[in-house]
C-alpha cells in the first residue's frame, strides 16, 4: 500500500531544487547529489519541523542557566543535606584540605556542565518521544523519510568537541596543581605501609612508628605545614582514601607512591582502604587525627618514648608476651619483642581503636581481641591464641600499661 | 491463531534432538545456544546479586561471612561480563547478522561451534571451583579476588588451593571462544554479504558487529596472554607479577585494562546495533545519518584502544600520563554523542510505536545518556581520585550495563523472539516487565551513586553505621525485588509465548532488513533464493516500489 506522505514526495526533483535543499541547512539527505532533494514547496512542512527543533533547543538553552544553577545548587547540597551529609564524615563534597578542595571545585564545575547537557538532551528526548508518538494507528502512511544532514552532524560533533576541550583543560590544570605541587620546607613526612589489613605509619624525621591512627598537624595557609605521605605496601594492593582530605592513591608492592594533605581544621577524619585487598578489606579503616601544632608535638614526644619499664604488677603478662607467640609479630620498644608483621604495640594505649579502627580500644574489647581476633574481624591474619582465661587477663593487664 | 503456527520441529526422538543440537554448526542453533546458556548464567548472577544486596541492606550485617561475600562479588562480576553479556550479545549477532546480510551461515560454521563450546566450558569451569576449588575435603570455595583479579592476590601466596586456577582457565577458555567468534564476525561481514550489499549498504547492525569482531581480536588477546602469564607464575616458576623477583603487579593492571576498557565497547557496540535497528523501525523512519553512525562506531572502536589507563588514575601515574588518558577518554564522548543525537533525530518527525521493543529502546536512550555523563566524571582524573573504586563507580557501570546493555538486550528479545521462534511475546506481560524492571532499576542504581559520593568503597562486605550510607543501601536492596519480579515475568512470558504465543508471521513489525524476508523461524538454509539488495532497507524497497531507497542512497 502507498505509505508515502506529501513531504516525502520530494524525490522527483529538478537539479535546481537540490541547491535549495542544501541552502536550507535542515535535516535533509546527506547524500543529496544522488539522493532525495527537496523542492521549496515540499520543504516548508519540514522547515516547520526544523523550526520546532530550533525552538526546543533555544528554549532549553534559555532555561539552561536556571537548570545549571538548580543543578549546581541542588546536587551537592542535596547530597550533603538529604543524606545526612554534614554528618557523613566521609563526604567528598565537604573538603577540608587543598587537594580535596581542588577536586571539589573542579567537580562542581563539571557537574554544572554535565547537568546542562543532561537537561538539554533529556528534554529533547522526552519531547521527541511524546510529540512524535503515533496516536492515530488507523493512519498507515509512513512519515517523511529523512536520511541525515551534514550540517546537523557537524553541529553535534563540534559542540561536544568544544565541551571536551574545556573539560580537559580545566582537568589538566587540577591534575598539575595536585600532583606536581611543590613541597614547602615545613612539611611533615610520613611513610605509610599498608598491610593486610592494617596501616603502619612511620615518621622517619621524628623516629616515630605508629599504627592505624595517623596524627598530623593542622596546616595554616599562611605558614603551611602539609603532610607528605610516601605510600608502600607490604603485601597486596591497597588504597589510601580519606575523602575530606584528598583523593585516593594506591599502595602497591614495589611501586612507591606519594600524596599530600594540608588539613585546614583540626579534628578526626575518617576513611578506609579503597582497593580490594583480601578477606578483611572492609575493616581496614583509616583514621586521621589533625591536631594543633602543640598537641601534635606533644603526641610526637610521647610516641618517641620507650615503653615504660615492666611494672612488677604485670610481670606475668610481660613474660607471657615473650613466651607465647606475641613477640614474633609485634614490637614493643625496650623489650626483645621486635616483630614486624603486626602493629607496633609500644604505645598501644595511646590509640582510640584496635583492629585498624574496627572497635574502640577498651579493656573488654582488648580481651576479646587477644582471645580471638576473628570475633571482630573474621579473616584477620592474627591467629587466635590458645590462652587460658588467667593468661589472657595477665597479657591484657600488661598491654594496658603500654601508654 | 496458535493452531495456525508452523510446527517448530518435526517429531524426532529426544536423543536425536540432543545430537542435533550438540553437533550443530548452524549459526541459528549456535546463536540460540549462546542465548539460552547466557540466560541460565544470568539467573545465577542475579541470585548472587540478591545475596550481595541482602548483606549490604543495612550496616554491620552478618548474613554472609566476608569470605563468602568476596566469592560472590567475584563470581557475579566474572559471570556477568564473560558468561552473560558476551555470550548473549555474540548469540544475537550469530543469529541475526547472517540473516541480515543475506548469507546462509557464518563464514566458518565449525569454528563457530568451537567458539560456543569453548565459552560454555569456560563458564562451567568457573563454577567447577565450587566442587574442587580448595580441595575435595573443602568444597564450596571459589575465586575471591574480584573480577579484575589484581596481582598479587592471584599468586600462590595469597590464593592457595585451586580457585584461582579455575578462574584462570575459565577466562582463558572463554577468551579462546570469544576470539573464534570475533574472527567469524569479521570474516562473515566482509565476505558473506549477498549480491548488491556493498559495505555502505549493510544494515548498521552488520557494521557494528564488524567493529565488534575487530575489537574482540585486539582486546581479548592481551587478556588471554595475561592468563598464560598468570598460569606460568603459578605453576612454572615464572615471575611476571612477582615483585620479589623483579616482576610487576602494575603490569597485570595494564594487561587487564587494555582488555577491560575496550571490553566495555565490545559489550555496548552490539547494543548500539540493537538500538539502531529498533529505533528506526518503531519510529517508521530510516536511521538518521547512517554514514556518521558508521564513522562514530569505527572511531569508538579505535579510540577505545587508547583509554585503558583511566582505570588506573589512582595507581600513581605521572601527571602527564594521567592527563593523556583524561583526554583520550573524554574524546570518546564525541562519537558517543553523535550516536545519541542521531537516534534522537531518527525519533524526530517519526510516528513512534511504543511496542515493547521500543519501550526498552527508549529506556536505553535515557539511561545510557546518564551512564555516559557519569562516565565523563570518572574520566576526569582528579574527580576519579575521589570516585574511583567507590560505589559511584559501581552505580555508573551498572547504569551502563543494566540500564544500557540489559535494556537493549530486552529490546532485542522482544524484537527478534518472533523471528527466532515464530511466536510473538505477549505485549501486556512485556509492558509489565518493562515498567517493573524500570522502577527496580532506578531504585537500585540511582541511589547507589550517593554512598559513593559519601565515601563508601566498593567490595566491602559490611560497613559502619553513621556515615549516611544506610538509607541508600536499603533502597537499593529493595529495588532488587522489583528487578527480580520483572525478570520472572520475562521468563514466564518467554516460556508461555514459546508454547502458545500468537503466530508471528514473517514480518510482524513491518521492518526493513533481510531477516524479515524469510520465514519465522528461518529454515536451516535461511533463504531459498539468495536475495539481492539495492539499498540499506531492501524490504522498504519491496514495500514501496514507487519510492525505493536505492534511488536516494
Image: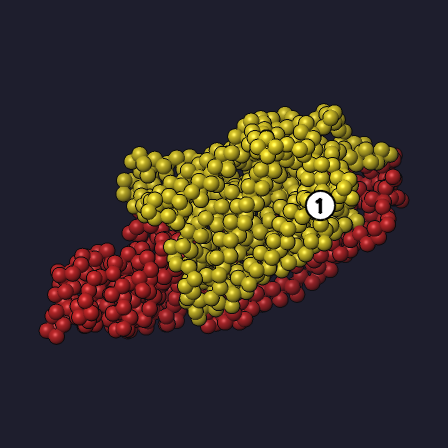
Chain colours: A red, B yellow
Chain of the residue that carries numbered disc 1 in the rendered image:
B
Residue at image point 61% right, 38% down = B32
Q: Is residue B118 left or right of residue B296?
A: left
Residue at image point 34% right, 48% down = B138
Question: What residue is disc 1 on?
Answer: B500
Residue B482 is at least partly visible in this image: yes
Label 1: how many Cα within 10 Å (few below 14, some 14–19, many 20+): some
The part of the image, by quadrant, that contains residue B521 is top right
Q: Is residue B97 left or right of residue B41?
A: right
The part of the image, by quadrant, that contains residue B195 is top right
The part of the image, by quadrant, that contains residue A124 is bottom right
Q: Is residue A316 above or below residue A249?
A: below
Q: Is residue A252 left or right of residue A45?
A: left
Residue B151 is at least partly visible in this image: no
Q: Quadrant of the C terminus of chain A?
A: bottom left
Q: Quadrant of the N terminus of chain A?
A: top right
Residue at image point 54% right, 36% down = B215
Relative to the observer, which residue lies in front, B296 or B450?
B450
Q: Is residue B20 above or below residue A239?
A: above
Q: Is residue A274 above or below residue B186?
A: below
- Expressed as whole percent of the image width and height from the top left, the position of residue B143 reads 40, 47
Residue at image point 39% right, 66% down = A270
Q: Is residue A315 left or right of residue A364?
A: left
SS at mark 1? helix
Amino acid at each position: 500500500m502507498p505509505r508515502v506522505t506529501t513531504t516525502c514526495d520530494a524525490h522527483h526533483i529538478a537539479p535546481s531544487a537540490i541547491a535549495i535543499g542544501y541552502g536550507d541547512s535542515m535535516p535533509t539527505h546527506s547524500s543529496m547529489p544522488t539522493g532525495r532533494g527537496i523542492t521549496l514547496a515540499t520543504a516548508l512542512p519540514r522547515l516547520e519541523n526544523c523550526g520546532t527543533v530550533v525552538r526546543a533547543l533555544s528554549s532549553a538553552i534559555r532555561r539552561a542557566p536556571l537548570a545549571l544553577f538548580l543543578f549546581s545548587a541542588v546536587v551537592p547540597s542535596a547530597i550533603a543535606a538529604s543524606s545526612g551529609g554534614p554528618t557523613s564524615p566521609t563526604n567528598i563534597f565537604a573538603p577540608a584540605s587543598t587537594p580535596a578542595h581542588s577536586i571539589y571545585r573542579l567537580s562542581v564545575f563539571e557537574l554544572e556542565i554535565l547537568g546542562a547537557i543532561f537537561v538539554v538532551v533529556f528534554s529533547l528526548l522526552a519531547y521527541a518521544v511524546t510529540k512524535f508518538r503515533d496516536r492515530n494507528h488507523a493512519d498507515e502512511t509512513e512519515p517523511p523519510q529523512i536520511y541525515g544532514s551534514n550540517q546537523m552532524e557537524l553541529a553535534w560533533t563540534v559542540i561536544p568537541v568544544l565541551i571536551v576541550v574545556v573539560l580537559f583543560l580545566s582537568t589538566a590544570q587540577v591534575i598539575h596543581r595536585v600532583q606536581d605541587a611543590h613541597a614547602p620546607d615545613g612539611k611533615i613526612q610520613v611513610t605509610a605501609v599498608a598491610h593486610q589489613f592494617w596501616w603502619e605509619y612511620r615518621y622517619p624525621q621524628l623516629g616515630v612508628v605508629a599504627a592505624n591512627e595517623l596524627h598530623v598537624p593542622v596546616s595554616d595557609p599562611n605558614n603551611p605545614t602539609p603532610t607528605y605521605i610516601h605510600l608502600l605496601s607490604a603485601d597486596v594492593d591497597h588504597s589510601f582514601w580519606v575523602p575530606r582530605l584528598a583523593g585516593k592513591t594506591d599502595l602497591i608492592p614495589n611501586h612507591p607512591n606519594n600524596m599530600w594533605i594540608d588539613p585546614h581544621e583540626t579534628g578526626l577524619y575518617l576513611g578506609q582502604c579503597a582497593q580490594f585487598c583480601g578477606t578483611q578489606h572492609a575493616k581496614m579503616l583509616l583514621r586521621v587525627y589533625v591536631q594543633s601544632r602543640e598537641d601534635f608535638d606533644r603526641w610526637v614526644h610521647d610516641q618517641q618514648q620507650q615503653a615504660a619499664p615492666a611494672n612488677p604488677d604485670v610481670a606475668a603478662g610481660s613474660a607471657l608476651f615473650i613466651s607465647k607467640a606475641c613477640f614474633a609479630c609485634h614490637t614493643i620498644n625496650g623489650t626483645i619483642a621486635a616483630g614486624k608483621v603486626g602493629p607496633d604495640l609500644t604505645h598501644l594505649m595511646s590509640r582510640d581503636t584496635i583492629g585498624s579502627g574496627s572497635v574502640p580500644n577498651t579493656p573488654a574489647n582488648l580481651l576479646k581481641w587477644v582471645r580471638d581476633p576473628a570475633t571482630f574481624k573474621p579473616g584477620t591474619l592474627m591467629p587466635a591464641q590458645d590462652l587460658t582465661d588467667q593468661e589472657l587477663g595477665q597479657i591484657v593487664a600488661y598491654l594496658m600499661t603500654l601508654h | 491463531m496458535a493452531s495456525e503456527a508452523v510446527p517448530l520441529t518435526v517429531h524426532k526422538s529426544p536423543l536425536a534432538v540432543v545430537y542435533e543440537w550438540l553437533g550443530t554448526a548452524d549459526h541459528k542453533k549456535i546463536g540460540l545456544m549462546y542465548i539460552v546458556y547466557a540466560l541460565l548464567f544470568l539467573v545465577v548472577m542475579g541470585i548472587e546479586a540478591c545475596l550481595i544486596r541482602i548483606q549490604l541492606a543495612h550496616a554491620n550485617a552478618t548474613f554472609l561471612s566476608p569470605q563468602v561475600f568476596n566469592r560472590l562479588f567475584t563470581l557475579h562480576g566474572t559471570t556477568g561480563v564473560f558468561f552473560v553479556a558476551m555470550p548473549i550479545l555474540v548469540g544475537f549477532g550469530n543469529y541475526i547478522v547472517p540473516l541480515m546480510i543475506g548469507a546462509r551461515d557464518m563464514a566458518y560454521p565449525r569454528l563457530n561451534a568451537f567458539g560456543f563450546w569453548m565459552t560454555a566450558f569456560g563458564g562451567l569451569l568457573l563454577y567447577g571451583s565450587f566442587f574442587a576449588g580448595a580441595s575435595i575435603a573443602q568444597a564450596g570455595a571459589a575465586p575471591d579476588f574480584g573480577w579484575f583479579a589484581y596481582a598479587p592476590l592471584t599468586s600462590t601466596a595469597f590464593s592457595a588451593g585451586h580457585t584461582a586456577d579455575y578462574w584462570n582457565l575459565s577466562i582463558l577458555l572463554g577468551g579462546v571462544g570469544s576470539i573464534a567468534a570475533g574472527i567469524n564476525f569479521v570474516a562473515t561481514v566482509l565476505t558473506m554479504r549477498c549480491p548488491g550489499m556493498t559495505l555502505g549498504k549493510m544494515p548498521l547492525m552488520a557494521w557494528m558487529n564488524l567493529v565488534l569482531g575487530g575489537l574482540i581480536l585486539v582486546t581479548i588477546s592481551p587478556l588471554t596472554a595475561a592468563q598464560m602469564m598468570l598460569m606460568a607464575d603459578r605453576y612454572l616458576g615464572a615471575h611476571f607479577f612477582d615483585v620479589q623477583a623483579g616482576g610487576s603487579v602494575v603490569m597485570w593492571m595494564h594487561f587487564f585494562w587494555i582488555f577491560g576498557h575496550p571490553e566495555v565497547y565490545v559489550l555496548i557496540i552490539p547494543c548500539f546495533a540493537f538500538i539502531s535497528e529498533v529505533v528506526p523501525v518503531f519510529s517508521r523512519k530510516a536511521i538518521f545519518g547512517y554514514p556518521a553512525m558508521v564513522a562514530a562506531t569505527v572511531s569508538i572502536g579505535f579510540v577505545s584502544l587508547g583509554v585503558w589507563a583511566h582505570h588506573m588514575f589512582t595507581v600513581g601515574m605521572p601527571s602527564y600520563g594521567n592527563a593523556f588518558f583524561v583526554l583520550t577518554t573524554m574524546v570518546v564522548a564525541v562519537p558517543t554523542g553523535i550516536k545519541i543525537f542521531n537516534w534522537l533525530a531518527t525519533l524526530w518527525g517519526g510516528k513512534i510505536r511504543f511496542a515493547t521493543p521500543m519501550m526498552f529502546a527508549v529506556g536505553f536512550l535515557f539511561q545510557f545518556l546518564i551512564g555516559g555523563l557519569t562516565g565523563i566524571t570518572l574520566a576526569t582524573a582528579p574527580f576519579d581520585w575521589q570516585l574511583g573504586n567507590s560505589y559511584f563507580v559501581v552505580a555508573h557501570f551498572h547504569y551502563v550495563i543494566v540500564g544500557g546493555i540489559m535494556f537493549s538486550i530486552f529490546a532485542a528479545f522482544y524484537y527478534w523472539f518472533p523471528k527466532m521462534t515464530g511466536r510473538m511475546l505477549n505485549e501486556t506481560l512485556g509492558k509489565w516487565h518493562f515498567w517493573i524492571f524500570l522502577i527496580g532499576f532506578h531504585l537500585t542504581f540511582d541511589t547507589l551513586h550517593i554512598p559513593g559520593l559519601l565515601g563508601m568503597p566498593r567490595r566491602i562486605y559490611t560497613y559502619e553505621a553513621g556515615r549516611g550510607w544506610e538509607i541508600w543501601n536499603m533502597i537499593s536492596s529493595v529495588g532488587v525485588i522489583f528487578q527480580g519480579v520483572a525478570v520472572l515475568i520475562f521468563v514466564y512470558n518467554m516460556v508461555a509465548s514459546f508454547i502458545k504465543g500468537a503466530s508471528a508471521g514473517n514480518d510482524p513489525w513491518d521492518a526493513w532488513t533481510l531477516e524479515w524476508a524469510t520465514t519465522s523461524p528461518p529454515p536451516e538454509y535461511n533463504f531459498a533464493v539468495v536475495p539481492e539488495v539495492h539499498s540499506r532497507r531492501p524490504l522498504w524497497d519491496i514495500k514501496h516500489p514507487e519510492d525505493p531507497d536505492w534511488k536516494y542512497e
